[in-house]
Image (cartoon, rainbow, N blue to C red):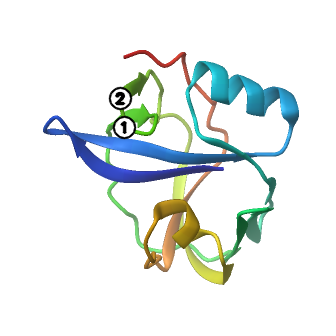
Amino acid sequence: MLWRIAVLRDGVPCWWAIACDLEARGPAWTAHRYVRYEVRRHRVVVDETRVITRGPAGELAIEVSNKVAPPLELERRELRTGRDAGWVVPWGDEAGPSLVHPVKIERDSLSQPTSGSPVKWSDRAVLRRGRAHRCGVAHR
């Protein structure tokens, strides 16, 4: 589960990946070493009706409705990582169908420790199915 926030870095709109929750040791090591994600060893569960990330830092549980909501405009931005958003990650964010679904936050003890401030969540989320993960090695 990738936590990203919209920022301006040197005047350029970017996504800044502030945390990446992964449970499996191999992918966690690879994400930290090559993509420069701030990885937390959290258990992540994704199914048709919910998304949960849980670990030592806290928990976020999101209920996903099976209804389809009005579409959202998706922003295309450069992906940045590292404590100063100084690493650029080549990645793709365009593949796969996207549907917007109503969501409800069931539990959240994780967003404030992750972002450093309270988070006001949207009541809609973009769900992607069939999207290939295309993330490359980070570079300065």
Looking at the image, residue 7 lies above or below residue 80: below
Looking at the image, residue 27 lies above or below residue 73: above
The residue under label 1 is which amino acid type?
Asp
Examine the image and state in which quarter residue 47 appears.
bottom right
Q: Which mark is residue 86?
A: 2
**To which residue does mark 1 refer?**
84
Q: Are marks 2 and 1 in contact (CB under 8 Å)?
A: yes
- Residue at disc 2, secondary structure: loop
Q: Position of residue 23 (x, y in %)?
A: 83, 45
Looking at the image, residue 120 lies above or below residue 76: below
Examine the image and state in which quarter residue 137 appears.
top right
- Residue at disc 1, secondary structure: loop
User: Which residue is drawn at the image coordinates 77% and 64% (left, top)?
Assistant: 48
In the picture provided, is 81 more to the left or to the right than 110? left
User: Which residue is drawn at the image coordinates 76% and 71% (left, top)?
Assistant: 49
Camera-nearest residue between 76 and 96: 76
The residue under label 2 is which amino acid type?
Gly
Looking at the image, residue 115 lies above or below residue 26: below
Q: Position of residue 24 (x, y in %)?
A: 86, 38
Q: Which quadrant of the rendered structure holds the C terminus?
A: top left
Q: Position of residue 116 (x, y in %)?
A: 46, 66
